[in-house]
Amino acid sequence: MKIVIMGAGGTGGYYGAHLAQTGNDVTFIARGAHLAAMRQNGLRLHGSRGTIHINPAQATDQPADISGPVDVVLFCVKLYDTESVAELIRPLIGPDSMVISVQNGVDGPERIAKVLGAGHVLGGAAYMSARIDQPGVVSYTSAMSKLVFGELDGTRSKRAQHFQAVCNQAGFTAELSDNITQTLWTKFALLAANASLTSLTRQPLGYVYGDPDMRPVARAAIEEVAAIAQAKQIGLPDDIVERTLALADTLPATMTTSMHHDLNAGKPMENASLSGLIVRLGRELGIPTPVHQVAFAALKPFQDGTN
């Protein structure tokens, strides 16, 4: 398949390296020192299951340099860049092209669809943890290795099934979701709490869920997302809070989040689209969201970066 990885950071680098090693035509969109290193030495992905080295790696910072149309765009950019980047990939989109949003949060697919049309957009949820160690080098830090994605209307299209097979051949698990909105909100319950509270406390998950004074705060953050999902009739399980806490307890105590890394590095953060979105929806629906309101307000001075 002809695949573009839009945003070759931790998530894009992880999936893209796997897809490239099995012979797919993969082009990475990156920038700066990371792009320069990929052009010179390829892309190296390493972790507990070994190393993948894609050399040479097809990499550019200009989507217009790629001859379209492509079969798949894995859309892995930060939420604050969603609309502007969606505009940049217009030349890559043909009648059957898929743009799979592999972003944090829950509103990425809807925002991309407003630019490119809903017929091209699928939702996706990444279940892995990876980061750029140094330019041209991505490391993964967990045993998770899965991508769940699906058409926004719940159909199991031939194009989605084809890409599922390609992913499974590439060495990570791919699952099709019949209700990707529900899938995204299920993940969001944990992701939003993790991102906001690791950033707010500057501590890893072991503190967020292990400290007796902090764990009730984490539970309340999850409960706020669950309440909004219920009001929006997303259809989350009745025991979503307990399920989410149980999942959190299986994660490495030393794990942090991409937003925590961005905060420490002085980079822009996704605060407005995570806790900020919860606060906005809470106001619209008349649902109190005090934990996420504090997190959003406290992190707001840093969300545009400090570098």
Image (tube, rainbow, N blue to C red):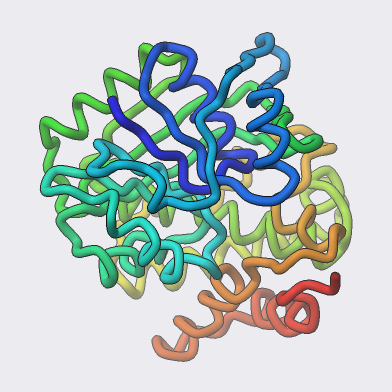
Q: Is residue 202 visible?
A: yes
- The quarter of the displayed image where residue 250 is located: top right
Q: Residue 251 in the image: x percent, y percent?
A: 70, 34
Q: Residue 221 in the image: x percent, y percent?
A: 63, 66
Camera-side residue of 63 and 283: 63
Q: Residue 124 in the image: x percent, y percent?
A: 38, 45
Camera-side residue of 71 and 120: 71
From the viewer's perspective, tell me whether residue 219 is left or right of residue 69.
Answer: right
Q: Relative to 184, say whether 36 is above or below.
A: above
Residue at the image position 47 percent from the left and 47 percent from the top: 6
Q: How many callouts does the rendering have? A: 0
Q: Relative to 173, say whether 63 is above or below.
A: below
Residue at the image position 73 percent from the left and 81 percent from the top: 300
Looking at the figure, which quarter contains the C terminus? Answer: bottom right
Camera-side residue of 236 and 142: 142
From the viewer's perspective, tell me whether residue 291 is left or right of residue 12.
Answer: right
From the viewer's perspective, tell me whether residue 144 is left or right of residue 151.
Answer: right
Q: Is residue 239 visible?
A: no
- The quarter of the displayed image where residue 293 is located: bottom right
Camera-side residue of 241 and 80: 80
From the viewer's perspective, tell me whether residue 92 is left or right of residue 201.
Answer: left
Residue at the image position 31 percent from the left and 19 percent from the top: 166
Looking at the figure, which quarter contains the N terminus? Answer: top left
Residue at the image position 75 percent from the left and 45 percent from the top: 33
Q: Residue 19 in the image: x percent, y percent?
A: 44, 22
